[in-house]
Amino acid sequence: MTNTLRPYPEYKDSGVHWLGKIPKHWPEKRAKYYFREIDERSQTGDEEMLSVSHITGVTPRSQKNVTMFKAESNVGQKRCQPGDLVINTMWAWMAALGVSNHEGIVSPSYGVYRPKSRQDYDSYYLDHLLRIEGYRSEYICRSTGIRSSRLRLYPDKFLSMPVICPPQEEQLAITRFLKAQNLLFRKFIRNKRRLIELLKEQKQTIINNMVTGKCEVRRVKGENGKEQLEAFPTPPRKLRPSNSEWLGDIPEHWEVRKLKFASKMIVGGATPASGQSELWDGDVVWITPQDVSKNERLRSSARQLTFAGITSCSTVVVPPGSVIVTSRAPVGNVSFAEVELCTNQGCKAVVPDEQYLLNEYCFVLLKAMQPVFQRVANGTTFPEISTWTLENIKVLLPPISEQETILSYLKVTTSTIDHAITRAEREIELIREYRARLISDVVTGQVDVRSVKCEEGSANEEFVEDFDEVEDETEFLAVAENGE
């Protein structure tokens, strides 16, 4: 994405082990020479509430989908203004900090630091500098706490940290370069995400046609003379009315049955008390809607329970082969359990009865039923599907032999699509790694961008959002701003 970048003519030792050498004319001092801590409190609580994350830095909370935390009053929150550096003290080890472009308020537990001189730093440059991986490792070393999730970066530790401060005109050149490059990175990621969504839609269409009986699988001879599976539209003469609005006409020999009569068990989940450490960090996988949204196959989770945690809230452990459906936030996402697990209250677990419904077939069937789940969900605060509603939804069941044939066909037919999705996801991962390395090299002076020309207007084009990162950030904010 860039031409070959050259180093600066001369370097000196920075005195920081992870940073190594920096351009000879760049000063490096303790943060206390550039910043002072600010502790101004809101008298009314009417200012705009700001969020702080490791992905987008400081942004108005109104632009984020954070609904899990709301203080009774914002009086006493810390005030900040444009140009202030805001650090989430509890999550600095993840580089949850940034330079604010907004006037507003933040949590009183955050650190707010104001530059002593507005001539020292360009806000965009400083924001990117302090969120690189090298500085994140510095925050970890300077934080105190018994484990990573409880580390705290206190003001005296931050202010004693060494920071570099290039000349203002070089910071502006770096800012122009990074804005132009970030635009290209985000466009690339956006286009790859669109490709992935199209591939997923194509795959889901194939699955939908099979599990609703619109297509039937036949064994035919291929060009090489070997027998293979192919799908054909189901002839109208083989169809009959299902008496179900969402199913329409179905193959005449397929059965319609309530989900509870094709399952051994359908259960909801629960959450233990968050403040009791003996209930957490155990060996039992504990699934939330966020885990389901990110993974079609569940092998692990963001948090795990102890057996004491399970009994404390009466969540139910279900076996491998269970199918997990999100019952809220959002409704209808589906994943397959490859290990024994339990869930929180935002999920339901379906344990298929394999004399009627194969585990893998249950997975593809329920994935195809997401629109149905969303249609029957209800609630005054947010849409939710109850266990009773899920149990009584009607499902379409081919004979077990046909379920096996359909699964064999889908495995072959969708494997090419799965490979294309995996390849696109890997390309996104690689471009993110390259972006992080490029930003680090540029802001620390490992490469010289002073003479690099950006296309006119490219650095100021409309922001292109990376939706995948926004989802990661929303999950982080939901946890970080609850103080967990």
Image (cartoon, rainbow, N blue to C red):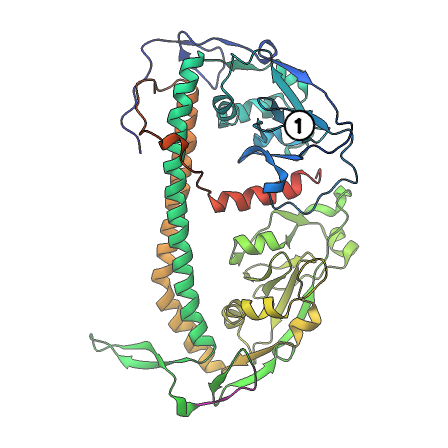
- Residue 392 lies, in percent from the top left, at 66, 77
Q: Residue furthest bottom?
A: 237
Secondary structure at badge 1 equals: helix
Compared across the picture, whether 197 is left or right of 59 comes to left
Q: Which residue lies furthest to the left in this view?
A: 224
Q: Considering the image in quadrants, where does the N terminus appear?
A: top left
Up/down of 358 relative to 380, above or below: below
Image-quadrant location for residue 139: top right
Compared across the picture, whether 322 is left or right of 313 comes to left
| Residue 71 magenta-highlighted | no
Residue 272 at least partly seen: yes
Up/down of 92 relative to 392, above or below: above
Query: Foreground: 175 or 271?
Result: 175
Which residue occupies 42% across, 24% down?
Answer: 175
Magenta region, residue range: 239-244
- Residue 339 lies, in percent from the top left, at 58, 59
- Residue 434 lies, in percent from the top left, at 38, 34
Which residue occupies 38% across, 40% down?
Answer: 430
Query: Foreground: 265 or 159?
Result: 159
Q: Considering the image in quadrants, where does the C terminus appear?
A: top right
Q: Badge 1, how many Cα within 10 Å: few under 14, some, many 20+?
A: many
Which residue occupies 63% across, 19% down?
Answer: 113
Residue 151 at least partly seen: no
Residue type at mark 1 is: Thr
Compared across the picture, whether 333 is left or right of 309 comes to left
Question: Which residue in the protein does label 1 denote?
Answer: 89
